[in-house]
Amino acid sequence: MMKDKMTRGEFLSSLAAGSATLALFPWLGSCTPQKEKETSGQKARLGIIGTGSRGKFHIANLLEDPSASIVALCDDFIPHLDEASALCPGAKRYTDYRKLLEDKDVDGVIICTPLSMHSQMTIDSLRAGKHSFCEKAMAHSVEQLKDMYRTWKGSSSVLMVGQQRLYDPKYVQAMDLVHSGAIGKVVGIRNYWYRNNDWRREVPSPEYERRINWRLYDEYSRGLMAELACHQLQNGSWAMGGLQPKCVTGTGSIMFWKDGREVFDSVAAIYLYPNGVHMTFDSIISNKHFGMGEQILGSEGTIDLVRGIIYSEAPAPRSGIRQFLDQIEQGVLSNSAFAGSSWVTEEASKDAGVRFAKNVTVNDGASSVGAAGDGSVELMHAFCLAVISGVQPEGIVEEAYWSTILALLGDKATRTGERIEIPSEIIY
Amino acid sequence: MEFTYSTRNPEVPTAYSRLDAMHTRCEILLPGMEESAARKLTQRIWDMVLDAEKRYNRFDGDSVLSKLNCSAFRQKVEVDGEMFMILQLCDNFRKMTDGYFDISAPSRVEGRAWVMDPAAHTVRFSVPGMSLDLGGIIKGFVLEKAIHEVAGETPCALLSFGGSSTASLGEHPLGGPWQVSVGHPYFRDKVAQTFPLTSESLSVSGRDPHGRGHIIDPHTGNILDKDDIIAVCGPSALVGEVLSTALWVAPHSERSKILSTFRGYRAWAIVPRTDGGVSSRKL
C-alpha cells in the first residue's frame, strides 16, 4: 500500500521537475527520488499532540509509512488518548504537551489541536528544537501568526502546515494548464464549500461541549473561514502566479443552526486582486447539493479543480474532418479547414469538458477529517523526510502564512462588514 | 467517443469516429468500407490510442513514462522495446534538428542528460530533476501506426489528432487529393492556407495568438513567443510532427538547413495577420 503512495510522491516531484509551474510548487522538490534515497531506511521519531479525529487520521496514514515511527502521544482528553494508544501501543503517553517536547526520543511533532492552540504549541515546539507540523490554519489571530512565523524564521527546525492541496497532483496539472494559457487570461476564481450538517461532534457530557465542539466557539475557532476557506484560498495565488489579493469584503450569519454556536453557519467573502480579478468563497452548512467547488475562470476556458476537468469558452466548430463527411454525403468536393497548431488543450466540449487529470478522486468536501487521495498522505510523508533530513521544504511556510492571513482577514471582513486591506508582503 | 456510419451517399458509405484522448480528439474517416469492418478497424485504432495515452502520458502516475521519470536518476530503468525505440528515435531527431526537438526540454537541463544502453534496453538520467516529455511526438507516432493499420484494409482514409496532426491515405473518395486547410487563427471562417494531401501527412505547430505559448526552446529554456505557424507535409506523420515543432522552435536562419536533413518533406512558415490576411513562405 505504502509503495503506491510513495510512488505517487515521486510522481509529484517528477511532474514538478518537468513543469513550468515548478516555481509555484517549490516544496515538491523535497520529495524527489534523491531525497527518498538519502533518507532510505531511516525513521522520523514522531510525537502526536492532539489525538482527536484529525490526529488519528494522520496516525493511520503514518502507520503505513516506513519512514515514520510514532513514539509519543499527547492529549488531555483521555478517551482520545486511549484511542490513539490502541493504534500505537508502544508510544509513550503524555497529557501535557510541554512534557512531550522535553522527550529526547522525539524528533518531530504533529500538532492537531484546536486552532487557538496552534501558535503557542508550535512556537514552544520550535523553541524546543523539534521539527514541527501544525494543522492548518496556522493561527487564531494575525498577531499569533506573526509570532509563529517570526519564531520559525529564527529557528533551525523544519515547519510544515497541514494544507494537503500542496501535494495533490491535480492542482499541479491544473496550474500547468492555467499558466500555459489554456484558459486565456484568468478573470475570476470561485470557491465554495457546502455541507448539510451541524458541524458538531458527539459530547460525552455537557462540560465537554466547548472542548469537543471548539470549532463552534470564537474563543477557539475562526469558523468556516479558517477551517474550510483556508484550503481553497490558495487556488487564487497559484492561478494568479503568486500575486496576493489587496483587500477583502464579506458577510456572514448564523441563519440555520441556532444552537448556541458563535461562529457563522453561512459566509460569503470576496477578495480583490490588484489587477481587478475577484476571488470568491462562500459556504453554507445547511445545504449540500453543490458540495465543494473550486473553479478558475479564464477568458477562453474554465478549469474545475475538484473534478480535474477543463472546459472551453468557445466549443469547437464542426470539425473539418466532419465537414469531409458532409461533402461525401452530398457528393460535393471542396477544401476543409481544420488543421491548427497544437498549443492548447483543444476542442473541449461545451457540456462534457475534457478531463485533464487521471485517477481523480473527487472530494465532495463532506468529511471534516480528511479524504482519500487529497494529498494528506504525501504531505505527511514529506514531513517525515524533512524530519529525517532536517531540510525545510522550500516555500511551504510562506504558502501557509498567506492562506492563513487570507482566511483570518476574510473572517474579520465577514464579522465587521468592513473592507479589510491585505498587506502586499509577509509582515512579522 | 462516437461512431457514425453514414449511407446518405450510397455510392460512398462512410464511417466517422471521434475519440477524446491525449487532451484532444482523434477523428477517423473511413469512406467505402462495410460497416462492421469499419467498426472493428476503428476499435483497433481506439485501443492503440488509449494504450499510448496510458503508457506515455507523463501526467499519469501509473504510466510507463512517469515510472521512468520517477526512477531513472536513482537507477537504470529497463524499458520495453517500443519505449526504447521511441526514445532512440527522439535522440536521433534531437541530433538531426540540431537540438531543437528535445524531449527533455521541459526539465530545463543543459545538454543531453540521459543515457541509453541499447544492449540492456535501459535508460538512466545523469542529473537530478530530469524528466522526459513525449507530448511532442506521441500523437505522430500513434497516427503513423494507425495509418499503417488502416492501409491494410482500405485504399482511402483520413485520420486527425486535434487538427495539429493529420494523415491521409489515398485520395478523396470523390476524386483528387484531400484538400486540408489550416484555419486562420484570428478568424474562424477564414483559411490561412490549403494543402492537397495524397497519402501524405500534414503537421502544424505554433503558438495560440490569444494565449501564452508552452513550447520551450531547448537551448535557452525559455518559453517561446513567435507569431508564425509552421506547416510540414511529407510521407510520415511522426516525422512531420517532430519537424514542425523543431522548425518552429529554431531561429529563422536555421530552418532551411534543418529541413534539408529530412528528405521528402516540404515546409511553410505562415504568418497570419490580425486584418485577416496571411503571408506564407516556403522554406
Image (tube, rainbow, N blue to C red):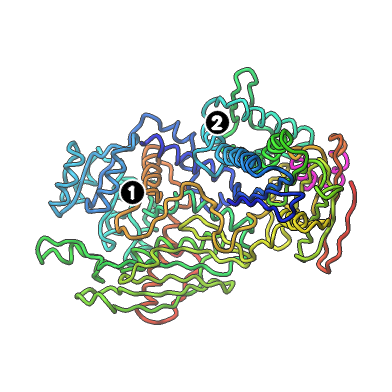
Which of the 4 image quadrants contains residue A266? Answer: bottom left
Indicate the secondary structure of the residue bearing disc 1: strand
- Please, what is the three-letter code of the amino acid marked with disc 1? Ser
- Whether residue A388 is situated above or below residue A83 in the rendered picture: above
Have a look at marks 1 and 2 and say if they share a chain: no
Residue under numbered circle 2: B73
Prevalent SS, magenta region: helix
Q: Which residues are magenta?
A: B240-258
Towards the viewer: A287 or A135: A287
Query: Which class describes the residues within 10 Å of circle 1: few (<14), some (14-19), or many (20+)?
Result: many
Residue A392 spot, x, y in % from top left: 43, 46
Looking at the rendered structure, the kind of residue marked 2 is Phe
**As drawn, which residue projects farthest toward the right?**
B282
In contact (CB < 8 Å): disc 1 and disc 2: no
Q: Which residue in the protein does label 1 denote?
A: A132
Instruction: For mark 2, name the chain.
Output: B
Dot 2 surroundings within 10 Å: few (below 14), some, or many (20 or more)?
many
> At numbered mark 2, what does the secondary structure look like: helix, strand or loop?
loop
